């Protein structure tokens, strides 16, 4: 969060990488000027930043790391996103946090979702959880409502789809996936990915803070992404997550499509699936203790989840919880919200803007809702009389 400190540390660590470090720092600062909430970003300022950023848009994080000679700087460049993502992912993340334009949601993602639900209900909305939509109702090129699993049909002035497109097109909606979105799925450079996560109860006085990236030993597998990185995250900033004197450690290791399918296939054999999860949980604990011997005997396993867990929870066919990997050479942009050939139907999914994530989903949701409201307002009256908006 203190980029002056980061810059000083990089320069002090490796004088031989001074030129590359300064170039990297200039790029982050150019983005920081654009991202500060307290400033109005002018078109001229954005244009001035482009030459500084252009070289990074064509570099993967791995290629950027290879430009440094010091091993710690090389690992720093890939510690957040791995080698295959565009290096802009690192620059954007650093710039947002250091400019004061990003932070962790209080209470975590669940609390953030609950605040959204409370706001929606306070505005007169109706929230129906545990309600499966089996069909988006269309007629004459127009969406007019949804059908639920129990047969109930709900009329709507607009339908906004927020699910994984793999759960929608050709399933609950009799329409092909929009071509621009389908091209993302067909592009071999835009990997889909997921992860295996573990959670442990731990003593509050941990030997690290924030996020810590280590190289796994015993728990690594050939089907995981990259160079065997295990990302540790501790939650001492959320004292409500654990009893006094304790905190929570979670771990994450990434998997591309082959790794995701490994766990999806394995989950069909319940005994084998449980055995593999138990092995991964034990080996992950061992990797943590190998790096931090002071934690030996002090970690208590809480849970483990895999791409199969995400599939069961969200319905995403591949068990993914984010969108596509954003490779170098691609400019981040959001695909259209409208579904071609069907009026009154809108998309608001992270899949429209790789690499996705909660902020992206929120932004696209706001865009779709605004478009739907404007379309309804443009007519003399709503096509269907309803007292409340509904979210399912």
Image: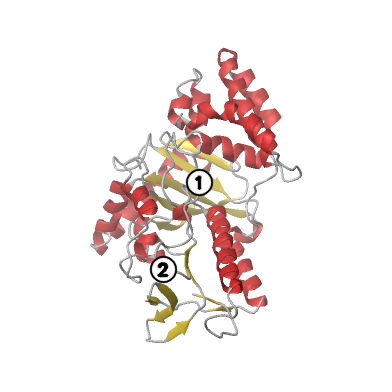
**In the image shown, does 20 or 238 lie closer to the viewer?**
20
Q: Position of residue 90 (x, y in %)?
A: 54, 36
Q: Residues within 10 Å of mark 2 (few under 14, many from 20)?
A: some
Q: Let me know if residue 292 appears in the view.
A: no
* Residue at image location 56% in from the left, 42% down from the top: 211
* Residue at image location 53% in from the left, 29% down from the top: 54
Q: Let me know if residue 320 appears in the view.
A: yes
- Disc 2 target residue: 342
Q: Earlier in the sequence, mark 1 or mark 2?
A: 1
Q: Position of residue 223 (x, y in %)?
A: 29, 43
* Residue at image location 54% in from the left, 63% down from the top: 368
**Image color mode:** secondary structure
- The circle on residue 304 is none
Q: Position of residue 178 (x, y in %)?
A: 37, 57
Label 1 residue SS: loop
In this view, the residue farthest toward the front is: 380
Above or below — where is 123 with respect to 272?
below
Q: Nearer the viewer, mark 1 or mark 2?
A: 2
- Quadrant where the N terminus is found in the figure: top right
Q: Is residue 254 left or right of residue 15?
A: left
In this view, the residue farthest toward the top is: 16
Q: Position of residue 50 (x, y in %)?
A: 59, 31
* Residue at image location 75% in from the left, 42% down from the top: 39
Q: Residues within 10 Å of mark 1 (few under 14, many from 20)?
A: few
> How much space separates mark 1 and mark 2, taking CA atoms?
23 Å
Residue 22's quadrant in the figure? top right
Q: Is residue 228 left or right of residue 22?
A: left
**In the image shown, does 338 or 247 lie closer to the viewer?**
338
- The circle on residue 333 is 1
């Amino acid at each position: 969060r203190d980029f002056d400190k980061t810059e000083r540390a990089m320069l002090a660590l490796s004088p031989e990488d001074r030129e590359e470090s300064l170039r990297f720092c200039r790029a982050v600062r150019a983005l920081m000027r654009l991202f500060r909430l307290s400033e109005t970003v002018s078109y001229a300022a954005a244009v001035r930043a482009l030459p500084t950023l252009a070289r990074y848009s064509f570099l993967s994080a791995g290629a950027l790391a290879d430009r440094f000679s010091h091993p710690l700087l090389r690992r720093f460049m890939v510690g957040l996103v791995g080698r295959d993502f565009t290096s802009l992912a690192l620059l954007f993340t650093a710039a947002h946090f250091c400019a004061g334009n990003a932070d962790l949601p209080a209470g975590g993602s669940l609390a953030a979702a609950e605040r959204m639900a409370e706001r929606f209900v306070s505005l007169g909305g109706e929230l129906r959880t545990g309600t499966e939509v089996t069909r988006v109702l269309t007629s004459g090129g127009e969406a007019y409502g949804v059908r639920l699993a129990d047969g109930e049909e709900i009329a709507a002035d607009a339908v906004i789809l927020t699910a994984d497109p793999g759960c929608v097109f050709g399933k609950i909606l009799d329409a092909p996936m929009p071509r621009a979105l389908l091209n993302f799925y067909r592009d071999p450079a835009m990997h889909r990915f997921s992860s295996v996560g573990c959670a442990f109860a731990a003593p509050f006085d941990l030997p690290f803070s924030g996020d810590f990236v280590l190289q796994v030993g015993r728990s690594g597998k050939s089907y995981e992404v990259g160079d065997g990185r295990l990302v540790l995250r501790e939650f001492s900033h959320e004292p409500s997550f654990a009893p006094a004197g304790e905190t929570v450690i979670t771990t994450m290791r990434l998997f591309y499509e082959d790794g995701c399918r490994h766990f999806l296939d394995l989950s069909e054999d319940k005994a084998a699936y449980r055995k593999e999860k138990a092995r991964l949980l034990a080996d992950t604990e061992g990797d943590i203790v190998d790096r931090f011997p002071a934690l030996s005997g002090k970690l208590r396993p809480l849970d483990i989840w895999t791409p199969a867990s995400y599939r069961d929870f969200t319905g995403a066919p591949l068990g993914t919880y984010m969108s596509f990997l954003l490779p170098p050479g691609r400019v981040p942009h959001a695909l259209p919200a409208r579904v071609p050939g069907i009026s009154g139907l809108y998309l608001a999914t992270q899949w429209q803007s790789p690499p996705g994530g909660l902020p992206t989903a929120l932004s696209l949701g706001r865009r779709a809702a605004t478009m739907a409201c404007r379309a309804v307002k443009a007519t003399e009256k709503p096509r269907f009389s309803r007292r409340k908006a509904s979210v399912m």
